[in-house]
Every structure is written in C-alpha cells, then in structure tokens.
Image: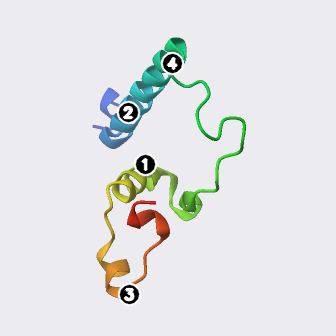
C-alpha cells in the first residue's frame, strides 16, 4: 500500500514507547504539583553516570526495567560476572 496513510503511522513499538513517555511525564508533573519530589536524597547533585550509554536508545528503557527487576542475561550469568546494579544495588 504505497502512498497510503498506513505508511505514515508510527511503528507499534514507537507508539507504545511514546505512550509510556507521556504517562511518565504526566505522573512526574502530578507529583511535582503535590510537592512529592522536594527534598529528595541527592537533590541538587548530578546523577551518577548510567551504564546505558552503550545501549542503543530504543532498548535502554527495557534494559533498565529488566536490570531493576534483577534480571541477569544468560550470557552474563554464564560468565559469572554481573554489575553491582544487577545484584539489587
């Protein structure tokens, strides 16, 4: 269907990512309005560098979710080496 509107629709994964980003932004704005993000530990200091810099941008969110859930990829587990974050730090 060349030239149809279907060619211009965002890819399903992109649409899902956009929806998640919009939801996250809304939740953050609501928390800010309620004052829930004031005086958090580390406020005013730069964030620690994330090891996600070498992960392709379209995979960073899912990698972070998996890491925060304690998932260790089989190839890393087989080597017996994990980052401190994968152990729940």
Specify whether 36 is left or right of 74: right
| Dot 2 or dot 1, earlier in sequence | 2
Q: Can you tell which quarter of the image residue 23 is in?
A: top left
Q: Pick whichever, 1 or 59, lies toward us.
A: 59
Q: CA distance from mark 2 to mark 4?
A: 14 Å
At x 72% / y 42%, what residue is drawn? 45
Are dots 2 and 1 in contact, CB under 8 Å? yes
Q: CA distance from mark 3 to mark 1?
A: 24 Å
Q: Nearer the viewer, mark 3 or mark 2?
A: 3
Q: Residue furthest top?
A: 33
Q: Can residue 15 be seen in this snapshot?
A: yes
Residue bearing the label numbered 3: 79
Relative height, residue 66 to residue 82 (above, below): above
Q: CA distance from mark 3 to mark 2?
A: 34 Å
- Provide the secondary structure element on which disc 3 rests: helix
Residue bearing the label numbered 1: 61
Residue bearing the label numbered 4: 29
Q: Pick whichever, 22 or 10, lies toward us.
A: 22
Q: Pick whichever, 10 or 3, lies toward us.
A: 10
Question: Could you tell me residue 46's position as x and y percent?
Answer: 71, 45
């Amino acid at each position: 269907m060349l030239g149809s509107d279907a060619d211009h629709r965002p890819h399903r994964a992109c649409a899902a990512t956009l929806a998640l980003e919009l939801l996250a932004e809304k939740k953050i704005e609501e928390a800010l309005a309620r004052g829930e993000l004031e005086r958090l530990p580390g406020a005013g200091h730069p964030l620690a560098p994330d090891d996600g810099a070498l992960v392709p941008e379209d995979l960073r969110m899912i990698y972070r979710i998996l890491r925060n859930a304690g998932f260790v990829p089989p190839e890393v587990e087989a080597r017996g080496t994990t980052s401190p974050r994968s152990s729940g730090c």
